[in-house]
Amino acid sequence: MTLGCNVDLKTNKKILSLEYLESKIKKIRSEDYTLKIVLTTGVFDLVHPGHLDYFEKARSFGDMLVVSIVDDEFVQKGPGRPIFNQDLRLSWLAALEVVDYVVLNGDFGPWKVMKAVKPDVYVKGYNLALGLIKDIELMRDLNGQTVLIPEIMHSTEIFERIKSI
């Protein structure tokens, strides 16, 4: 069971459907072809200082930061995860100043979002998962670059520590 509630924040205007985000980015790019768009993806089950550091670093690679979150049904972090439902996770990421737009992934991997956004830079935490190889290949096909950055903490570690108290 995931925790969540209906949260109506003024920052929710930063939460877009994938279709609307794609058309918005096309329009923005037609007006400013020099704009660098950065995309990152993840579960973001519990926003913590590590995420804030990660988003700041990701944003430093471009002018606009788009964050795609994994749908509840596709989260593979173990039993009981995600703790917080996708609507709540979307809302609190949209509330962050460093984040320009938030989109729900809608698929098992990030590839549909990557193809729609066509980011100049795709940022991921430094791990060598098999899916990351496909991400890097797709970014190469999209004429973008992939940047791996170290993460200073993980939600899973926080949840494990809380369970041990």
Image: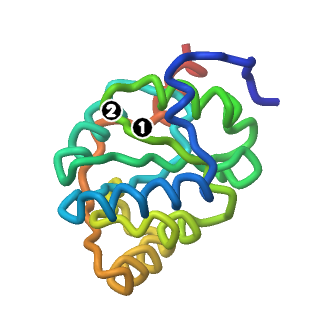
Q: Which residue is mark 1?
A: 154
Residue 54 percent location from the top left of the image: 29, 40
- For image coordinates 50% across by 42% down, the residue present is 102
In the drawing, what numbered circle is on residue 51? none
- Front-most of 95 and 49? 95
Write down the quadrant of residue 29 in the picture. bottom left
The reply, left or right, for residue 138 in relation to residue 112 is left
Q: Secondary structure at mark 2?
A: helix
- Front-most of 78 and 98? 98
The reply, left or right, for residue 139 in relation to residue 35 is right
- For image coordinates 45% across by 46% down, the residue present is 67
In the drawing, what numbered circle is on residue 50? 2
The answer to whether any part of residue 160 appears in the image is no
- Front-most of 131 and 64? 64
- For image coordinates 67% across by 17% down, the residue present is 7
Residue 108 percent location from the top left of the image: 67, 64
Image height of 150 relative to 114, above or below:
above
Is disc 2 in contact with disc 1, using a CB cutoff of under 8 Å? yes
| Type of the residue with mark 2 | Gly
Write down the quadrant of residue 113 in the picture. bottom right
- For image coordinates 68% across by 57% down, the residue present is 106
Q: Secondary structure at mark 1?
A: loop
Residue 76 percent location from the top left of the image: 66, 53
| Type of the residue with mark 1 | His
The answer to whether any part of residue 3 appears in the image is yes
Residue 12 percent location from the top left of the image: 56, 27
Q: Nearer the viewer, mark 2 or mark 1?
A: 2
Say which label, 2 or 1, has the lower sequence index: 2
